Amino acid sequence: MSKNFSFDQFSKLLPFESIILVYHLVSDNDVKHVKHLFPYRSPKQFEKDLDFLSKHFEFIDWDDFINKKKTSKPSVLLTFDDGYREFYDIISPILLRKGIFAINYINPKFIDNNEMMWRNKASLIVSGIIENKNFQDKMFEWTGNKSKDIISSVLSINFKDKHQLDEIADHLEIDIKNYLKTNPVYLTAEQLQKLKNDGFGIASHGWDHPLYNQLSLIEQLENTQKSLDHMNENHFMIDSFAFPFTDHLVKNQFFDSVFSQNPDLRVTFGAAGLKLDSNEKNIQRIPIEIRNYSVEEVLKNEIIYYQFLKNIKKNMIKRS
Ligand SMILES: [Zn+2]
């Protein structure tokens, strides 16, 4: 990406008045249960993102977003997925200091760290294999495969086969419950209440972070409803929902049912970057944790790619 073009030239091409960004966590630490899934930012890099964004955008809160408040600059809404504890320890103090609102899309099943989300297990296992010669030998004896191949197959285990991750963890004697106890991964119920009292949004990201296109319609609706009911019982937000992973291949029937069963629900969010969606209530967010790109680079790429998609009339996700 050429550095010669200022962002202002790009922002003129921004197709929407408002953008929504999605992060997961911010940390200076070696986060073993995440590091093999996506690159996360250090607090310093995150603050740099916020400084860049505040120059070119206006940060908005949920009410302004949902009421489509007119802003002088394009508006930006921050969202954080998966309910990692770093939101409490690291992110919320930065946002509070800067007066910036954000929503956490969380999976109720993992509140209080009694269980680990399957993708976090995959990253934790891979960290163990990389760091531990004994694990490499055990896996070789068990499978006859080299570590490099084992790592890529662990990372490609899908939601339907997630029990395989427990089998591997057992075989390697990785004690996931103990890991969660000594090193909490997710926000606790108490922290969530404190974040709510500090003005942050807490909302649903599905019950246990399934991949929706691997579920039947009934399973999709059950998983969503169970998580929305949890939000309702705990007085969190029930007017939005963010799909775990992706809304790819989720059909109109799902949206029709979920919106009719939940009259308070106003929007659902995907994470496919700048794109329109044939279902108007489903809005796409921009994932920011891509390679080591700065937020400026991510947004420039998104804007250029959107223009390209628009030229070939593929800037809208069409659902059946
Ligand atoms: Zn997620």
Image (cartoon, helix red, strand yellow):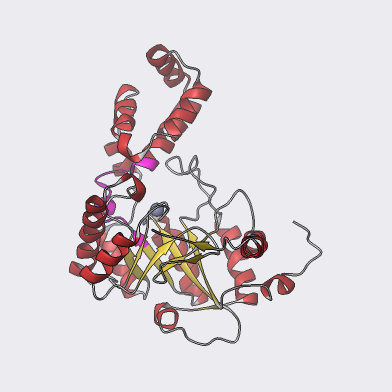
Left or right: 28 in relation to 188: right
The image quadrant that residue 293 belongs to is bottom right
What residue sits 49% from the left and 39% below the top?
36
The image quadrant that residue 204 belongs to is bottom left
The image quadrant that residue 71 belongs to is bottom right
Measuring from the top left, give residue 21's x and y in whole percent: 51, 65
Q: Is residue 230 above or below residue 185?
A: below
* Residue located farthest toward the right when viewing the structure as drawn: 4
Q: Is residue 210 magenta?
A: no
**Screen quadrant of the N terminus:** bottom right
Q: Is residue 225 above or below residue 120?
A: below
Q: Is residue 44 above or below residue 182?
A: below
Measuring from the top left, give residue 159's x and y in whole percent: 34, 40
**Residue 112 visible at all:** no
What residue sits 50% from the left and 23% below the top?
149
Toward the viewer: 102 or 287?
A: 287
First to last magenta residue range: 105-119
What residue sits 27% from the left and 38% below the top?
177
Q: Is residue 4 above or below residue 124?
A: below
Q: Is residue 107 magenta?
A: yes
Left or right: 45 in relation to 92: right
Toward the viewer: 68 or 188?
A: 68
Measuring from the top left, give residue 19's x and y in whole percent: 53, 71
Measuring from the top left, give residue 233's x and y in whole percent: 18, 68
Toward the viewer: 62 or 34?
A: 62
